[in-house]
Image: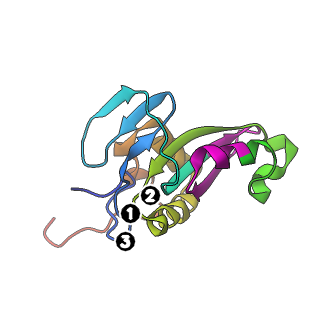
Amino acid sequence: MRGPPHGPSPETPAPAHGPIHKQGPIHNPSDSRVEQRETGISKHMPWTYILECADGSLYVGSTTDLERRVSEHNLGLGATYTRLRRRRPVRLVWAAEFQRVEDAFRYEKQIQGWSRAKRTALIEGRFGDLPDLASRPPRRTPGG
């Protein structure tokens, strides 16, 4: 099984199931195909998520209750970043569920370090583009 869709990383385990959109592609990191389907949101499981703010910016966070957290952001009770009126309302554009809180938090921090172009590729399901959008070129193995 390969790692999450951001590229190989031995420190970050794959999400429990692929990234979800309320209406959009689902990607299972252990499967190479993207399928279209409606997915429910599990309560009290660790999530990493991306919100699109009203001003066009992207916010990355993690939580154990995705629906509650998105609602808090929209009510101005979320993170300082989304409390600003110009950033609301926010819209959930991508999320991945994990087995462990530590893994969701680690993935959140990893995505926060990505460029907007790389985050957008993740949101749009362009997983093949992610390695090319890395800030550093991939390490080459000897003889490869």
Of badges 3 and 2, nearer the viewer stands 3
Which amino acid, mark 1? Pro
Quadrant hosting residue 11: bottom left
Foreground of the two, 102 or 132: 102
* Residue with the mark numbered 2: 134
The image shows residue 27 at horizontal and vertical percentages of 35, 40
* Residue with the mark numbered 1: 137
Disc 2 packing (10 Å; few <14; some 14–19; many ≥20): some
The image shows residue 3 at horizontal and vertical percentages of 30, 58
Please report the bounds of the magenta region as a residue range: 51-71
For the residues marked 3 and 2, what is the alpha-carbon distance in whole angstroms?
Answer: 17 Å
Which amino acid, mark 3? Glu
Foreground of the two, 116 or 107: 107
Does the residue at mark 2 contact the one at mark 1 (Cβ under 8 Å)?
yes
Residue 8 versus residue 32 in the image, above or below: below
Q: Secondary structure at mark 1?
A: loop
The answer to whether 43 appears left or right of 61 in the picture is left
